[in-house]
Image (cartoon, rainbow, N blue to C red):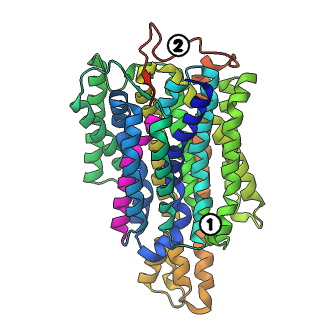
Amino acid sequence: MSPVRRWTALLVLVLPVLLISIDMSVLGIAVPALSADLQPTSNQLLWVIDLYSFLLAGLLIFAGSLGDRIGRKRMLLIGAPLFGAASIVAAFATSPEMLILGRAMLGIGGATLMPSTLGLIRAIFPDRTERRTAIAVWAAALSGGAAVGPVLGGLLLESFWWGSVFLLNVPVIVLFLLAAPFLLPEAKDPNPGPFDPASVILSIAGMISLVYALKTGVKGLDGTVLAALVLGIAAMTWFVTRQRRRENPMIDVSLFGNFAFTSALSINVISMFAFMGLMFFLPQYLMLVRGMGSAEAGLWMLPLALATVVGTMLAPALARMASVRAVIMTGLALVIVAFVIGTRLDTAETIVLFALLSAAFGIGVGLAETLTNDVILTAAPSGRAGAAAAISETGYEFGGAMGTAVLGTAGMAVYSSRVVETASLPGMDTEAATAASQTLAGAHEIAQTLPDGGARLREIADSAFLAGIDLVAAIGIGTAAITLVLAWRGLRSESRAAPAGPDADVPPAGSAGHAGAEVTRG
């Protein structure tokens, strides 16, 4: 494949990645308008936001393996129309339940897209130096899209209803469907082995059960949570045992014996855990605590998006001068600095601290996550690129889902416990206090009906929300510190600066002596 065709194919591949990552975060800035229109409970609101990531995480292993079997380009062309149709359902939702359904459909559609994009990059760019740059562009779309989601959402909400944030997907999907058939090559495993429906069922049941148990368990244990946890552990244990015994497994679990692979995957999970947990709170902080309009809040999220892109694009160049491990550890150190700044937002009189947080967090995440994907892909045979990409993406989505669920729930628990005590305020009763404790947007809406504009309620609600952010930042500092130690110990094999030129350890796809992916012109 010529250089022009390779890089043009990459530009096509990042289109669905950009949309999927935008959809992970765009609702953050639409929460006030969505809450006022559909009036979801706090539990429904969390499901609206994180069900998308849950289904992505649950289906990615299966979708990646299926793409290896039937062709990754074909998987993209199947998933893109589904993603576009789901966007329309979500955009015109008239109830929390309908929006939850739309988000579920988006998750299913997204699962067919994500592993195929990263798997195709592995096939299109066999040269490791080129592939690092390609993965940097891919990671910029993934992390930058999550950061730019609130920017685009804010601009749309200034003139349109909250559902317009989903319609942004439709023209991009149409453009992708017009370009992909002609510009993307096909790539698949030439010897996939027999299809294994039992492994498919076990992987889906195990992942979804575990995610459900972790999400609901943070609010308290009951019989349903324990049953889901037991089912998830049992299914995933059986799944792993089955993969070890099969000649052609869905995923090569022996990869987890590679310490660098496992460490890089863990860094992805924990980084996205912190990233998406923080993204749940920042847009609401700008719009409700700082009193900005949607467009202004979106523009203030732009530095985070730009910093993330800068970090992802710098990572390959820095890895040639220093080492992969040093670059990743520098990124994680910046993430810790950002969270420390986050603990001071409750005392900030200006927006300067928020800008510093955005710069440190964006560059840090960009530096850390770009190179971990290269470590993961390099460890995998190219014939299993889709499955390895699915493992990587499952880590991303699982971490993102848990960030929203665990950190979102923890922060909102602090908020609710403080706001529910406002029933003693003039004009308030128990019912109004309970409603105000569901979401910050709900508290501000109720405040407008109280004497003197509910200034005291807004003050209490804003203070409670900032206390929730403090807790999230403290948890983020702890998890990022653990990840920093993991990078130092687990990435010792990546402690030298990367040499220029083709892979020494990973031959081109389809080469002799390697289980290469079959690559054909589209």
Which of pointers 1 and 2 lies earlier in the amino acid sequence?
A: 1
Q: Is residue 445 visible?
A: yes
Q: Residue at x 59, y 39 (%)?
A: 139
Point out residue 231 in the picture as x, y percentages from the top left corner: 25, 41
In space, the residues marked 1 and 2 are separated at their CA atoms by 46 Å
Q: Which residue is mark 1?
A: 155
Q: Which residues are magenta?
A: 95-117
Q: Residues within 10 Å of mark 1 (few under 14, many from 20)?
A: some
Q: Is residue 498 magenta?
A: no
**SS type, badge 2:** loop
In percent of width and height, residue 68 lies at 37, 28
Q: Nearer the viewer, residue 128 or 367?
A: 128
For the image, the number of numbered tags is: 2
Residues tagged 1 and 2 counted as in contact (Cβ below 8 A): no
By secondary structure, the bulk of the magenta-drawn segment is best described as helix
Is the residue 228 above or below the residue 234 in the image? below
Residue 170: x and y, percent? 47, 57
Task: Look at 37% across and 30% down and name the residue there.
Answer: 71
Q: Which residue is mark 2?
A: 507
Percent x, y of residue 294: 62, 69
User: Which residue is at a point 58% across and 44% down the rendered structure image?
Assistant: 141
Residue 106 belongs to magenta span: yes
What amino acid type should be assigned to the residue bearing mark 2? Pro
Above or below, 69 against 431 in this view is above
Q: Residues within 10 Å of mark 2 (few under 14, many from 20)?
A: many
- In the rendered structure, the answer to whether residue 298 lies left or right of residue 515 reads right
491 with respect to 237 (left or right): right
